[in-house]
Every structure is written in C-alpha cells, then in structure tokens.
Image (tube, helix red, strand yellow):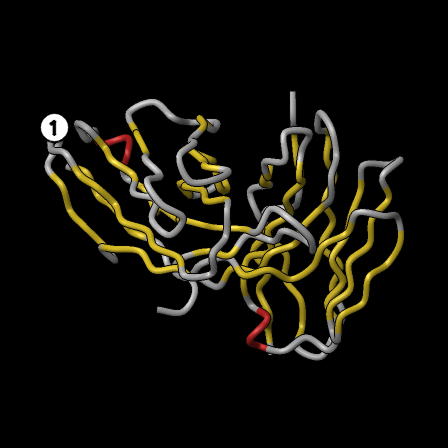
C-alpha cells in the first residue's frame, strides 16, 4: 500500500441498506477525514478523527458514523442509506505535528443510492 | 458564518497566464491551501500560505493577503494538462479545512 486506499471504487446501493466504506492509510498520519463532494458544493466534512480512539462530527454528519480503532483504518458507515447520500466520498489523512499538514486524499468512492 | 468564494469557471489559452482568485471570511485563520483536482480524480496538494506574500513553486505561484481575506493562484505557461478544478481551502480556528466550491479551468489550444 502506498498512501491512502479506499474501497469500493464505486457502489450502487438500494435505499435502506447498510453500507461501510473502507479507508486505509500507511503514512502513520494521526488525523483522518471523510468528505463528500457534490457538484457545485465543494468538499464537505462528514466526520474526522484527530488520533486513534477519537472521532468528531463535521459539517454534515447525519446518517453517517465512523470508528477509529487504530491509526491506519477509518471506516465510514451509512446505517440506512437514502438517495440524498448519493455522492463521491473521499477519505483523507494528514500529519498533526511539524510541517504544513496538507491533507492527502484517497481515490474516492462513487456511491449511488437508489 | 464562514464563506469561501472563487469563480465557478475560467477559460484560458495554452501558453498564457491565468490568475484564480479566492476570497474568504472565516472564524480563525491558520493557513490557506490550494489543491488541484482533475475530473474523476482526488484532490492533490499544490500550495500553502500562512504569511502574507507570494510563494512560488515552478509554474505555479500562490499569494496571500490576510488583511484582505484574499488569495490567488497564478498559473504560468499553461499546458493542456492544467485543465482541472482548483480548490481553495482555509484552515480555520478548529484546524479543520473549509473548502471553496472550486474553479473549473478550461485550457484551449
């Protein structure tokens, strides 16, 4: 693994189904983030984690949950998917000490909820 | 509220220079980032400004004026591969990034 990986690449999901998007990084970054990107709205933060064992809510957390059991993994779960959750989901990570703290992004998951 | 404004779309000619502006109003400021995002791909980091002035990195430069809440990204010697969206983001008081909607740059031969 190099950088951040996300799975699946794309998914079509029936409304009401449960879905977990996976995110793994190998850069030993403390902070991780989940964003959704919709046309014309830019990136919106769903949830974040500043370090393993802690999570926080972003701008649009409703309908989503996360966990951070270890440094590398940060899964995002949709408990009961709705069509408004159709979007492209990006996972990102960043260091939290020294340097610029730029965020590195995974390739994204394109999710369609029907 | 918090707000970041940048033009929705710009068009420029191959070989020319283009300036993409970004204005922001945020509660707290810990730096401003520019990212490039090609269609269907993830954003990639271009530049970071935390002090006023110009940061130059090859064909790309980024400028910041904190007193005016203003930044621009300057792209020189435009190439067709520069066709992409350019995202402005401010690191706010809680150290979370606040993102603009992005500027789609179209390069014409």
Mark 1 neighbour class, 10 Å CA radius: few under 14, some 14 to 19, many 20 or more: some
**Quadrant housing the N terminus of chain A:** bottom left
**Quarter of the figure with residue A112:** top left
Residue B97 sits above or below residue B104 on the image: above
Name of the residue lying farthest toward the top: B1
The reply, left or right, for residue A98 in relation to residue A14 is right
**Quarter of the figure with residue A26:** bottom left
The reply, left or right, for residue B106 in relation to residue A57 is right
**Quadrant housing the C terminus of chain A:** top left
Q: Is residue A38 visible?
A: no
Residue B20 sits above or below residue B25 on the image: below
Report the front residue among B12 and B79: B79
Q: What residue did someone put label 1 on?
A: A16
Report the front residue among B78 and A74: A74
Q: Is residue B102 visible?
A: yes
**Picture coordinates of residue B64, whole percent (x, y):** 83, 48
Report the front residue among A40 and A14: A14
**Picture coordinates of residue A25, whole percent (x, y):** 39, 57
Q: Residue at x 74, y 64 (%)?
A: B18
The reply, left or right, for residue A56 in relation to residue B29 is left
**Picture coordinates of residue B27, whole percent (x, y):** 71, 25
Q: Residue at x 44, y 26 (%)?
A: A57
- Chain label for disc 1: A
- Find numbered disc 1 in the image and state the secondary structure of the residue it sits on: loop
Residue A111 sits above or below residue A17 on the image: below
Q: Residue at x 56, y 55 (%)?
A: B104
């Amino acid at each position: 693994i190099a950088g951040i990986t996300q799975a699946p690449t794309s998914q079509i999901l029936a409304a009401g189904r449960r879905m977990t998007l996976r995110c793994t990084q190998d850069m030993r970054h403390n902070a991780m983030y989940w964003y959704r990107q919709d046309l014309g709205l830019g990136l919106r933060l769903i949830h974040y984690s500043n370090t393993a064992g802690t999570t926080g809510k972003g701008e649009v957390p409703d309908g989503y949950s996360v966990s951070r059991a270890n440094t590398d993994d940060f899964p995002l779960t949709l408990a009961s998917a709705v069509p408004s959750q159709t979007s492209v989901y990006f996972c990102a990570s960043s260091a939290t000490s020294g340097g610029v703290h730029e965020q590195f992004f995974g390739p994204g998951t394109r999710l369609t909820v029907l | 509220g918090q707000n970041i404004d940048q033009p929705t779309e710009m068009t420029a000619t191959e070989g020319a220079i283009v300036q993409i502006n970004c204005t922001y109003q945020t509660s707290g400021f810990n730096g401003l980032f520019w990212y490039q995002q090609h269609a269907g791909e993830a954003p990639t980091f271009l530049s970071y400004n935390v002090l006023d002035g110009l940061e130059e990195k090859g064909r790309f430069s980024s400028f910041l004026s904190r007193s005016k809440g203003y930044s621009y990204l300057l792209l020189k010697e435009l190439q067709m591969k520069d066709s992409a969206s350019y995202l402005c983001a401010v690191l706010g008081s809680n150290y979370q990034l606040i993102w603009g909607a992005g500027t789609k740059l179209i390069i014409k031969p």
